[in-house]
Image (cartoon, grey):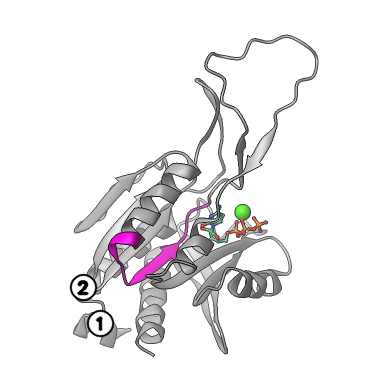
Amino acid sequence: AAEVFDYQLLTGKHVVITAGPTREAIDPVRYITNKSSGKMGFALAEAAAEAGARVTLIAGPVNLPTPSRVDRVDVSRAVDMFDACMKTVDEGCDVFIATAAVADYRPTVTADHKIKKSTEEIHLTLVKNPDIVASVAEHDKRPFTVGFAAETRDVVAYAQAKLVNKKLDMIATNDVSGSNVGFNSDNNALTVIWPGGHKVLPLASKAQIAKQLIELIAIRYKD
Ligand code: CTP
Ligand code: CA
């Protein structure tokens, strides 16, 4: 860890990180979201800046201060996060880290006015959102692309499948079935997988885990 941070191995590199949840509007006062706090993505942004990178943090609605020397772009919907990410990848970046808990679906239509209470049962139709990290990995100017996978069972098997299917360079996975890691916690434990190898980062603060993951990314990115 000392080497990367002493020699600033990400100096001159542009690192783009997505963080937090997205918000998918049902009507002007209601939306679908999830429990992501954004803490892991913000910790990674801070660690990448400390390692000398220029950092763009594309954040969904979270309640966190912007780390110093980090450019922050706030977005709400998954489609807005998608557009912001594609713009930075079009412009050219070196490393892309997707920690955001992007809503998989959005309401097919957003009502212009507050939906009134009427029948006993109503139905909400949802349509799939674009897969941001998979689109980044398919881009002509593909950066070194890192995904996250929060799973509640068969953690490594599901993560391995995502690594292959989304054509990622690396995936960091955590088991969110317990209460001491992931989501709103200040701690995390990760299993980091890449084609041909893996490394376990045992339970530690998100700041410490972030430094270790940035170090792993810097090492693998050079190869
Ligand atoms: N991701 C993304 N865009 C989406 C959905 C997910 O960029 N529309 C990214 C996440 O930021 C994460 C990775 O894909 O880095 C895996 O997200 P996850 O929700 O675990 O996987 P999904 O492909 O959405 O599959 P599922 O939710 O069914 O497990
Ligand atoms: Ca998902």
Q: Which residues are magenta?
A: 90-101
Q: Nearer the viewer, residue 208 or 76?
A: 76
- SS at mark 1 in the image: loop
What residue is at 61 percent from the left and 48 percent from the top?
A: 104
Quarter holding the C terminus?
bottom left
Disc 1, disc 2: CB below 8 Å?
yes
User: What amino acid is labelled 2 in the image?
Assistant: Gly
Which of the 4 image quarters holds residue 96? bottom left
Q: Which residue is mark 1?
A: 9
Please tell me which residue is depicted at 63% across the width and 70% down the height of the picture.
165
- Please state the horizontal and vertical placement of residue 184, each as a whole percent of the image: 50, 50
Residue lying furthest front: 140
Q: Which residue is mark 2?
A: 52
Residue 44 at x, y percent in the picture: 36, 64
As drawn, is 17 to the left or to the right of 164?
Answer: left
Q: Quadrant of ligand 1?
A: bottom right
- The reply to whether the magenta stretch includes residue 98 is yes
